[in-house]
Image (cartoon, grey):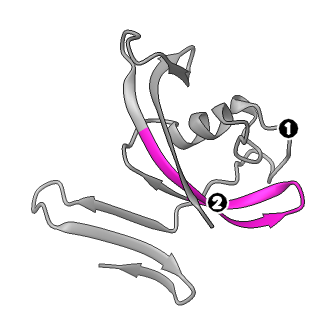
């Protein structure tokens, strides 16, 4: 399936992140790429690659394009997930070690959890 890019500016507003014009005070660029993996009735499983890492970025940008994360009432979801939870999970996290600067990779796959 085709990958799509979502690019906007995010800033804090009353405890949650909102999309703003790029010239708004405090707004920072937020970019992600998403791809539909599987459709299940009224829901779609998506794969997301963050190009920037802003607080609530995935939640606010998906809500903005009309597809809030299931169970995320703060960003407009009408669908229930598990009580008190939203349907947002990471299968891969990659970041530089804060001291050694080497890449840390955490993954969940069919074999379980891997750490490199």
SS assignment for the magenta stretch, majority: strand
Residue located 80% across and 52% down the image? 81
Q: Which residue is mark 2?
A: 46
Q: Is residue 102 left or right of residue 90?
A: left
Is residue 34 within the magenta segment? yes
- How many numbered discs? 2
Residue located 59% across and 62% down the image? 2
Residue 74, percent from left and from top: 70, 30
Tell me the distance, in whole angstroms, between the alpha carbons under discs 1 and 2: 18 Å
Residue extending farthest to the top is 25
Residue 46, percent from left and from top: 64, 60
Q: Is residue 68 left or right of residue 59?
A: right
Question: At numbered mark 1, what does the secondary structure look like: helix, strand or loop?
Answer: loop
Question: At numbered mark 2, what does the secondary structure look like: helix, strand or loop?
Answer: strand
Residue located 72% across and 42% down the image? 67
Q: Which residues are magenta?
A: 31-47
Residue extending farthest to the front is 2
Residue 59, percent from left and from top: 60, 39
Q: Is residue 101 left or right of residue 80?
A: left
Is residue 95 within the magenta segment? no
Residue located 11% across and 56% down the image? 99
Numbered tag placed on residue 78 in the rendering: 1
Residue extending farthest to the left is 100
Q: Quadrant of residue 98?
A: bottom left
Residue 51's place in the image compared with 103, above or below, is above
Q: Is residue 86 left or right of residue 53?
A: right
Residue 87, percent from left and from top: 70, 54
Dot 1 or dot 2, earlier in sequence: 2
Residue 65's place in the image compared with 102, above or below, is above
Residue 52's place in the image compared with 2, above or below, is above
């Amino acid at each position: 399936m085709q990958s799509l890019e979502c690019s906007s500016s995010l800033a804090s507003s009353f405890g949650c992140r909102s999309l703003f014009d790029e010239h708004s005070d405090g707004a920072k660029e937020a970019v992600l790429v998403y791809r539909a993996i599987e459709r299940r009735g009224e829901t779609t499983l998506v794969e997301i690659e963050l190009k920037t890492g802003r607080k609530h970025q995935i939640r606010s940008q998906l809500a903005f394009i009309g597809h809030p994360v299931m169970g995320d009432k703060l960003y407009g979801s009408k669908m229930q997930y598990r009580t008190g939870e939203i349907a947002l999970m990471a299968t891969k996290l990659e970041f530089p070690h804060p001291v050694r600067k080497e890449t840390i990779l955490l993954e969940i796959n069919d074999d379980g959890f891997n750490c490199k």
